[in-house]
Amino acid sequence: MADAREPWLSHGESATAPTDDAGAVLRAWRERNRQTQAAVAALLKTSQQHLSQIEKGLRPLSIDQRRTIAAELGISPEELGLSGGQTRHVVSSDHASSEIAASRLTWRAQRRWLNSHRSELARLAVDLYPAEQRIPRAPLLARPDWLPPSPIELRSLCLSLDESEHGTVVDGSEPESARVRPLRVADSRFEHYTSAIKYLDPPQLFESRPSYRLLGGSPTAGHMAFGLAAYFDKLDISEAVGHEIAAACMDDPAVLARPGRGLRPLLPFRELIGDPFDPLRRAIVPAITTLTIRLRRYPAEPSFLLHWRDPSRVATAGGVYDVVPAGEFQPSSVALWDRRNDFDLWRNIVREYSEELLGEPEHDG
């Protein structure tokens, strides 16, 4: 019987002939790449016990299961018996193939660790920056002029949009980001972090939608200037630096005991970015998060809404709780006229309310 924990082990065709050695191929690949059964089982979304039975030949593998293993681990489909009439070896003689598979396996494990430890990693990250940029009692950063002494009316903010091209100094393809970009082919890494997400760990919603890019100003100044960017421009920086600090902590757990600037030498990409508030060095694409307070009849206390960001559904900030609604500041569609129509904070907030609380379908973005 298939492991009931995961659907990929519950469907598909029956096993191949008793002489099938796919389990031995899987075991040899794991041992060659120095991976534990627990780590590989987690990537295949099954239990360690079930994987052990597969490796021993006690559990047959269907065609669909073999395809999943080939896609997740990078093992040659022929080695798993997906192409008949070919000689199969327990371990591929192609060293590059093994190297690519190991690179991708490590990357997936690091991304899963990131999505399971974002809160702890955020607390480590803020200690890397000056005290005046840290928000008290929260693992967040902000410039002093982004923290008004009292609430500001949305309609008092003046927004301007410059649709001309604006370059960046850092786009995520630099050598300093190589550690968070796994091998795509032999001797060549994925060009950007989002390319790796697309092919190795895509969430349910993953599109590079047009977005508004912050160019200057602040809420306390009463004016905010924006340009245009793509959603992936943001992820290629923000998710990549998160992955970088997760990888550093996984490689050397001792860094957790020496937070702050002791981490800096292990984070070359974060160091390259420099000032996180410089809108010319990278594409800063802000999100709008709205605290929704629910008032009830006295004596009931007011409450507010939170939702959990499921890593299987979202590409950024997965594994944490956020207020409702929350969404990127972006047009509702790719149409040119919506760049102007939707360039409004309140309009974006209402659109997110309709999607997250009223169940309206996701807009094209």
Image (spheres, helix red, strand yellow):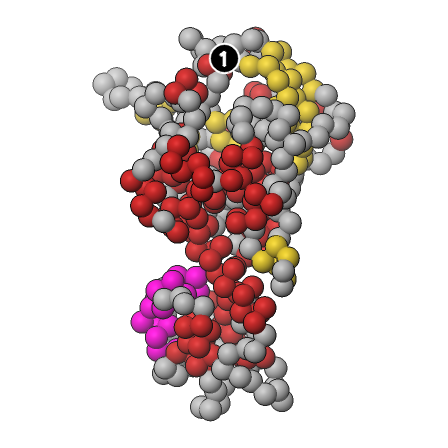
Q: Name the residue under label 1.
A: 145
- In the image, 77 versus 156, the foreground residue is 77
Instruction: Tell me what residue is drawn at x 61 percent, y 82 percent.
Output: 83
Residue 296 at what x, y percent from top left? 31, 21
Which residues fall within the magenta stretch? 37-54
> In the rendered view, does 81 fall on the left or right side of 169?
left
Residue placed most toward the observer, 200 or 264: 264
**Percent x, y for residue 273?**
56, 32
Q: Which of 152 and 88 is in front in this view?
A: 88
Where residue 263 sits in the image (x, y, percent)? 40, 38
Residue 163 showing in the rendered view: yes
* Count of picture labels: 1
Q: Type of residue at label 1?
A: Asp
Please name the residue shown 53% across and 84% down the image: 89
- Please say if 357 is above or below 151: below
Q: Quick check: is 52 in the magenta stretch? A: yes
Instruction: Choose top left, top right, bottom left or bottom right for residue 297.
Output: top left
Query: Does residue 297 sit above or below 153 in this rendering?
Result: below
Using the rendered image of the protein, determine whether residue 310 is visible from the camera's viewpoint: no
At horizontal 35% and vertical 26% (from top left) the residue drawn is: 138
- State the residue at coordinates (38%, 29%): 127
Q: Does the magenta stretch include residue 226?
A: no
